[in-house]
Image (cartoon, rainbow, N blue to C red):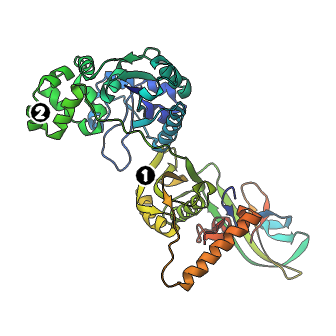
Amino acid sequence: MIACVLLPRFQLTVALEGRAELLQAPTALAPEPGGTQQIGEVSLSAEAFGVHPGMRLGEALARCPRLTLVAPDPAGVADSWERLLVRLESIGAGVEPERPGLVCFDVRGLLRLHRGLEGVLAAARRSLRTPARYGVAPSRFAAVAAATRARVRRPVIVSGERKQAGEFLAPLPVALLRARPALADLPEALERLGIATLGELAALAPAALADRFGTAGLHAHELASGGDGALRPRPASEFLREALELPEAASGIQLERALGLLIDRLLARRERRGRTLRAVVLSAVLVEQGGTWREQVVFREALADPVRMRLALAPRLALMPAPAQQLRLAVERFGPHASDQRSLLDDPVAARRARLREAIRQTRAAAGPDAALRVLEVDPDSRFPERRAVLTPFEG
Amino acid sequence: MSGPRRLSVPRRVAVDAGDEGRPLMVDGRAVDSVRESWLVEDRWWTDRPLRRRYWEVVTTCGRDEIVFHDLEKGRWWRQR
């Protein structure tokens, strides 16, 4: 049995923090800067005008000229979402987040721990501490569909097997397929062909769907029939992040230097325990309430070398749509421990560096983390001397 | 280290200034000559603009000092 937790309009709610009254008006998340001109999540009143997420901006404004666009806050959404996932994991759930605001977990392993399904849902409700909709069904897709039909205090539970899941899904609209990014375009085409419900879709021959829509058609048929792939819970993660306030809006070379500083600080953190970094998230708070910017970077191989990390991350800064007032670097996934492989012939430069590293380690152990610092030029050409350089941890 | 520590941070200094803002005494030492003076303005588009009149002076005891007058708050600072 799969449980689904749905927080409707999660991204919009986070982006509107402090301006909740806008949720009552026709509001939508503006397209991501530099991305396709499609709007994000929309408020209930915007939906009443026929505006839906993923719609082209021009079409959305044509349907609802009073539509208020809100700058997206991807970094804030990621932070809030991570906090909620960790809370859910604290009850023992192995969670698979589909997108911010929608997460599934297998309840079978928790039934005895929390004394039945009701106990599991009550524990999830207590841990999240925020109103959410809960759906439980034999398959992930059916659980998501059940959650969309649920009320905050009344979860929808579909018991049984695949057949019962198919029966539950049968009267529901094909628009639910939009929950899967790979099938986002399919509902519109199906509706044009007169297929309005998932039951009608399941009644079609798989071969006919494959002929018309390819693998997407087969996938949609499988989902509509009450089937779905197995749940793939995310591995438990640690949260390690460094942030740097940039008092003056920074871009270009200043931002690169700030990035170098963040990398040094992240690698100097004790919690890293000598491990390499496999994936990181670079994010920024943009100036003039321009929202936030977020970029996930997966390294080609796990790294602990600041120079190579800088080479991989610096080009991403050019994607930032506006100057930043805060830059953050967080570890998303650690790699294996960095190993010191010795070469056949001792390299004197490498040996000297290793001695230096060891000396710094011992100095820090004896005199604290501030014992070995270096001067990093942040903005060497600034007219204000205090902006030109900072002291940062020395990396040997 | 909790965060990066800036270098060359301005420190308060006692300055007696004459007409036109020219420093006459810096930390109780008389100013012998003014080597250079320049004006720096920045962040005028924000709520916290920066406006500084810098003076590079030599005191009678031979010290070369760079001081500035914060034109927003009216205080004097020494900077290296």
A212 left or right of A98?
A: left
A237 left or right of A176?
A: right
Label 1: chain?
Answer: A
Q: Which mark is residue A295?
A: 1
**Residue A187 visible in rendering:** no
In contact (CB < 8 Å): disc 1 and disc 2: no
Q: Quadrant of the N terminus of chain A?
A: top left
The residue located at (42%, 22%) in the rendering is A134
Query: Is the residue marked by circle 2 packed among few (<14), some (14-19), or many (20+) residues within 10 Å?
Result: some
Q: Which residue is mark 2?
A: A209
How far across and down, in percent of the image, does residue A330 sit?
52, 52
Q: Nearer the viewer, residue A175 or A147?
A: A147
How far across and down, in percent of the image, does residue A289 sit?
51, 44
Q: Nearer the viewer, residue B45 or A361?
A: A361
Q: Quadrant of the C terminus of chain A?
A: bottom right
- Kind of residue at badge 2: Leu
- Kind of residue at badge 1: Glu
Return the disc, 1 or 2, that comes first in the chain's sequence: 2
The residue located at (52%, 33%) in the rendering is A17
Q: Nearer the viewer, residue B55 or A159?
A: A159
Q: Which mark is residue A180?
A: none
Q: Nearer the viewer, residue A235 or B39?
A: A235
**Residue A124 visible in rendering:** yes
The residue located at (34%, 17%) in the rendering is A159
What is the C-alpha distance between the residues marked 1 and 2?
36 Å
Q: Quadrant of residue A232?
A: top left
